[in-house]
Image: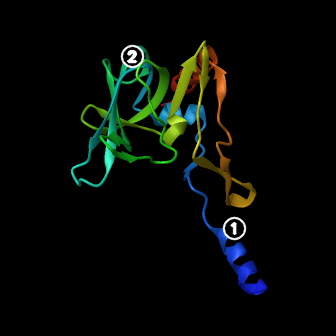
């Protein structure tokens, strides 16, 4: 049987363990729009996982057919995000959203390579659109925010997720882009 002091020490250590998830700096919609090389309202037409060249990790290529392009080059948008499932092998990266074929999304992406993009701010860069409402899903993502005095404060997982009418999101992005250099 464990001594009370040893049990208390183990309990304290378990409370000090880091939470499972990813941490990202909170990025407002206007900043997402300014940082992005592409902002697209579109429909996911393909989401296929592949093994990386190292053979140990997986990544998923997501093809999005634009409905409206708010920023960036014409044509289909191809995202590459870490994680996925290939055969009986799966890898999940907390804070990276999943994409389902057929879902309507707004994505904020930066160029990763020739014709390939990645989300900005992990799942902050994806809004799922349903019945005219755009929603972020920040499951598995803790947001760091600037606190008074310059320190960073870490919020709870999923804290700060946005849900707003698609027209409001469109308006905020267009206003941010109109005011950017």
Q: Is residue 122 above or below residue 62?
A: below
Left or right: 147 in relation to 144: right
Callout 2: few (<14), some (14-19), or many (20+) C-alpha neighbours within 10 Å? many
Of helix, strand and loop, which one carries label 2? strand
> SS class of the residue under badge 1?
helix
Q: Which residue is mark 2?
A: 66
Front residue of this view, candidates 142 and 117: 142
Q: Is residue 63 left or right of residue 23?
A: left
149 vs 141: above or below: below
Residue 116 in the image, given as x and y percentages of width and height: 29, 34
Q: Nearer the viewer, mark 2 or mark 1?
A: 1
The numbered disc on residue 116 is: none
- On the image, the x and y values in percent for residue 150 come to 68, 59
Label of residue 15 in the image: 1
In terms of image quadrants, where is residue 54?
A: bottom left
Quadrant containing the N terminus in the rendered view: bottom right
**Which residue occupies 57% across, 46% down?**
140
User: Where does residue 86 sit, x and y in percent of width and height?
Assistant: 30, 41
What residue do we see at 44% from left, 46% from top? 92
Q: Residue furthest front?
A: 1
Alpha carbon separation for disc pair 2 and 1: 46 Å
Which quarter of the picture shows residue 99? top left
Nearer to us in this view, 158 or 67 = 158
The residue sitting at 71% across, 73% down in the picture is 11
């Amino acid at each position: 049987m464990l001594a009370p002091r040893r049990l208390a020490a183990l309990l304290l250590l378990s409370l000090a363990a880091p939470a499972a998830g990813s941490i990202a700096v909170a990025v407002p919609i206007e900043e997402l729009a300014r940082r992005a090389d592409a902002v697209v309202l579109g429909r996911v037409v393909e989401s296929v996982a592949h093994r990386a060249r190292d053979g140990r990790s997986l990544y998923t290529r997501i093809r999005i057919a634009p409905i409206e392009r708010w920023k960036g080059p014409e044509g289909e948008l191809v995202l590459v995000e870490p994680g996925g499932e290939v055969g009986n092998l799966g890898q999940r990266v907390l804070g990276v959203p999943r994409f389902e074929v057929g879902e309507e999304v707004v994505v904020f992406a930066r160029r990763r390579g020739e014709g390939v993009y990645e989300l900005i701010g992990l799942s902050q860069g994806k809004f799922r659109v349903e019945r005219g409402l755009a929603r972020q899903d920040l499951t598995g993502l803790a947001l760091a925010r600037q606190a008074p005095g310059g320190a960073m404060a870490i919020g709870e997982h999923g804290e700060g997720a946005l849900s707003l009418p698609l027209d409001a999101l469109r308006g905020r992005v267009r206003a941010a882009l109109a005011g950017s250099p």
